[in-house]
Amino acid sequence: MSGERGLGTVAAITVSIIWGLSFVAASSILTTIAPLILATIRFIIAAAIYTPVIVWEYRKGNRPTVTDLKELALLGLLSMSIYFWLQYTGVQYAGAGISAVLATGFTPVLTGIAGTVLLKEKVTATKGLGIALGLTGVALIALPKIVIGSVDWLFLLGVGCLLGNAVCWSTYSTLSRRLMKRINRPLMVTAYTTLFGLLFLIPLSLTSDWGAVSMLSTGQWWSILYLAIVCSCVGYFLWNYTLSKLEAVNATVWLYLEPVAAFVGSFLLFGQVPVVLTIAGGAAIIIGAYMTNKSK
């Protein structure tokens, strides 16, 4: 593995852990406010942090073209506005652990298909086997939770939202990699994507009850800051950096670590003990991610 691919892999692992814990943070907040409000507050804070980056890049002469801005707006809509509306609705109705599993499990497969169709990336037999092994691990983690939990219509709504969530992310990852090949400025791409995502979220959030924000506890506000600063700012920068170093399908397979982080976080914060199948699934995910990333 070359130095640049190695750095890309480290970034992918780090962001997967960060985002896996975001499901736990979000679940603790969604008991008080609606999904759209949480997403909007998160990106108001993130956009405030990223606005100086946009100004700095503009003054340096790094200005996106009209075509670039159209693509950045689409990325913001897919990866932040629609994506988090669907994800937080899924977390609200399906729970943190299952949400991480479902949102993650379908993403590498869809990204592999999108990467093959849109970017002409080659999916080798080893990559295919790694993806299959990763999906097996995801299934092992999800099985006890699905069996123990009661399946109702709200649960099914949450599952449907999470599958749509995976479609948004796989499309975003593929289009973002294509844009990164042309611009290759991860920080600037992340900044503009965040701003556009917020612009789309604000009108959508007006359909929800903003009065509930006053009921948020101090701990919930800390969770929101984690989502906004660590997950949005640091996480998205690391992800765009990853996509500048690795193929889309190689990068996305590391997101299999998200469910592992989500279940570990649930154990540390809420005392939920992972079962044997969860541990076995985590091992399968890591092996599958290694196989997919190792293949060229």
Image (cartoon, rainbow, N blue to C red):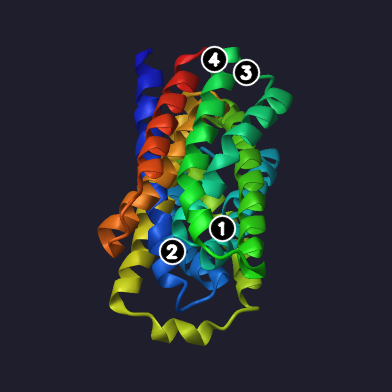
Whichever of labels 3 and 1 marks the residue nearer the N terminus, that label is 1
With 122 as the anchor, is 192 left or right in this view? left
Q: Secondary structure at mark 3?
A: loop
Q: Mark 1 Cα within 10 Å, few/some/many (few <14, many 20+)? A: many
Identify which residue, 237 or 60, lies in the foreground: 237
Whichever of labels 2 and 1 marks the residue nearer the N terminus, that label is 2
Q: CA distance from mark 2 to mark 4?
A: 35 Å
Q: Secondary structure at mark 4?
A: helix
Q: Secondary structure at mark 2?
A: helix
Residue under numbered circle 4: 126
Q: CA distance from mark 4 to mark 1?
A: 30 Å
Select label 4 or label 3 by which is in front.
4
Whether residue 59 is visible, yes or no, is no
Q: Mark 2 Cα within 10 Å, few/some/many (few <14, many 20+)? A: many
What's the amino acid at mark 4? Thr
- Residue at 62% x, 57% y is 159
Whether residue 173 is visible, yes or no, is yes
Which quadrant does the N terminus fall into? top left
Identify which residue, 178 or 187, lies in the foreground: 178
Whichever of labels 2 and 4 marks the residue nearer the N terminus, that label is 2
Q: Secondary structure at mark 1?
A: helix
Q: CA distance from mark 3 to mark 1?
A: 28 Å
What's the amino acid at mark 1? Gln
Residue 87: which numbered mark, if any?
1
